Amino acid sequence: MLLRAEDPRFHELMTTVADLASPTGQWPEAIHPLTHGGCMGDGQHVWAAAEWLMIVRHCFVREEGDHLNFMSRAN
């Protein structure tokens, strides 16, 4: 939503999420807020990686009704 609203805070959020990935580009199911380590569930959680791919995709392609917008502003 921050990206869509052209709110510059989206960049900090994406950077933080990327920094929490393992060296192999995976995220645990849950990350402890203090230690930033995996604290429960799967060590390589598939939906977390899928969410990351969707975030990156939305930086470049946006679907609007029956149109695809490439590298365009939200408004």
Image (cartoon, rainbow, N blue to C red):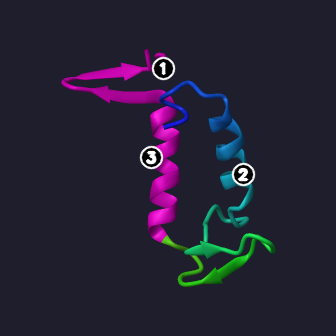
Amino acid on which the number 2 mark rests in the picture:
Thr
The one nearer the camera, 19 or 10, is 10
Q: Earlier in the sequence, mark 2 or mark 3?
A: 2
Residue at image location 66% in from the left, 54% down from the top: 17
Residue 15 vs 22, above or below: the answer is above
Q: Position of residue 68 (x, y in %)?
A: 30, 23
Asked if residue 65 is among those painted magenta in the image, a careful observer would answer yes
Q: Secondary structure at mark 1?
A: loop
The magenta segment is 46-75
**Residue 16 badge:** 2
Question: Dot 2: within a 10 Å radius of its alpha carbon, few (fewer than 14), some, or many (20 or more) residues?
Answer: few
Q: Point out the frontmost of discs 2 and 3.
A: 2
Q: Position of residue 73 (x, y in %)?
A: 48, 16
Question: What residue does disc 3 label?
Answer: 54
Amino acid on which the number 3 mark rests in the picture:
Met
Q: CA distance from mark 2 to mark 1?
A: 23 Å
Question: What residue does disc 1 label?
Answer: 71
Residue 32 vs 56, above or below: the answer is below
Residue 1 vs 47, above or below: the answer is above
Q: CA distance from mark 3 to mark 1?
A: 15 Å
Q: CA distance from mark 2 to mark 3?
A: 16 Å
